[in-house]
Amino acid sequence: MRIGLISDTHCPQRCVAYPVSLGSVFGGVDLILHAGDVGALWVLDALSELAPVVAVHGNDDTEEAWRELPFSTTVSLRGRRILLWHGHHRDVQIERASHKEDAWEPKLKRRVGIAQAAGAEIVVTGHTHIPLVWREGDVTCVNPGAIASGGAFFRQRIQTVAILSLNDNGAESVEHFNLCDGSSYDPAFEIDAGFAATSRRYQAPIVVPELLKQLRDTRDFDFEDEEAVKLCILSLSHECWSGGKEMISVNDVMTAIRSGPNVRAADRDLILGILDSGAAI
């Protein structure tokens, strides 16, 4: 039995369309498991043209995905129980604190522990945008990688999915695929490398260094219309993701915010004040 594994599609906010090779990679799979941060639910409808789909929501998902999809679920196939879960914490503050943790071991042990509590031998997660296979005791942890970037300020360098094969004798195998050309991909995961070092293999900033921290820190502010601000930034991000622009400059953001038709005056003044002064918040 061949199961397609996919995560972090973020359609259409960060990904307008799937890589063309996805159809051939997932051609003939029996089931598709989506590990969250789906985006619009039409993403699942599109995937269902290839095979039946089971999905969960992620921490950075759309309102409809949060409403209609579970936090986690279990699927039993060929006598094997699989836990499908995005990989994030339910509590937002705990989740934010976990981002500062660079060691892989606590992250993986948490996944193993939650799988064991569910009686699952396989746990499929996303969230990190990093493809990996990690086996500990009787649990196999799989992350298929990501289609879209982890945020508006980054580019996903390598878009990957995976196929989990379950044999009649109970054995399993996992193969990742690079969607650039649909070729087999070895994540070569190293637990000692640390999260930040591993992440740099898969994500690269698309904003100039002096801008990155300032934009990141604005996430902690209560904007009058945060969605309008996000759309202004995303318009620049999509230029980079499509190849029309290499990097986003301070002037690019200031121009977009000034001309954004739906950006509230208070939000515009706050962001322009920060960027114009060059002071980190």
Image (tube, rainbow, N blue to C red):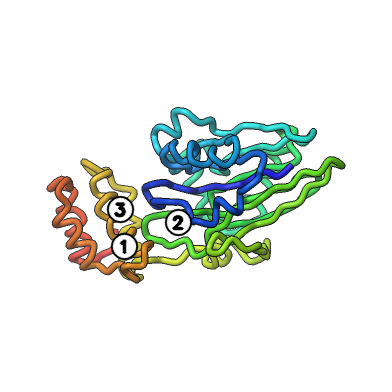
At 24% from the left edge and 49% from the top edge, which residue is drawn?
A: 229
Q: Which mark is residue 44?
A: none
Q: Which residue is mark 1?
A: 239
Q: Where is residue 131 shown, x and y percent of the image? A: 61, 57
* Cα–Cα gap, marks 2 and 3: 19 Å
Q: Is residue 59 above or below residue 254?
A: above
Front tag of 2 and 3: 2
- Mark 1 closeness class: few <14, some 14–19, many ≥20 residues within 10 Å: some
* Cα–Cα gap, marks 1 and 3: 21 Å
Label 1, secondary structure: give it.
Answer: helix
Label 3, secondary structure: give it.
Answer: helix
Label 2, secondary structure: give it.
Answer: loop
First reached walking from the N terminus: tag 1 or tag 3: 3
Residue type of the residue flagged with mark 3:
Thr
Q: Which sits in the foreground, 105 or 111?
A: 111
Residue type of the residue flagged with mark 2:
Ser
Residue type of the residue flagged with mark 1:
Glu
Q: Where is residue 169 shown, x and y percent of the image? A: 87, 42
**Quarter containing the C terminus:** bottom left
Q: Where is residue 185 shown, x and y percent of the image? A: 64, 63
Q: Where is residue 209 shown, x and y percent of the image? A: 35, 70
Q: Which mark is residue 149?
A: 2
* Cα–Cα gap, marks 1 and 2: 14 Å
First reached walking from the N terminus: tag 2 or tag 3: 2
Q: Which sits in the foreground, 32 or 266?
A: 32
First reached walking from the N terminus: tag 1 or tag 2: 2
At 41% from the left edge and 52% from the top edge, which residue is drawn?
A: 15
Q: Which residue is mark 3?
A: 218
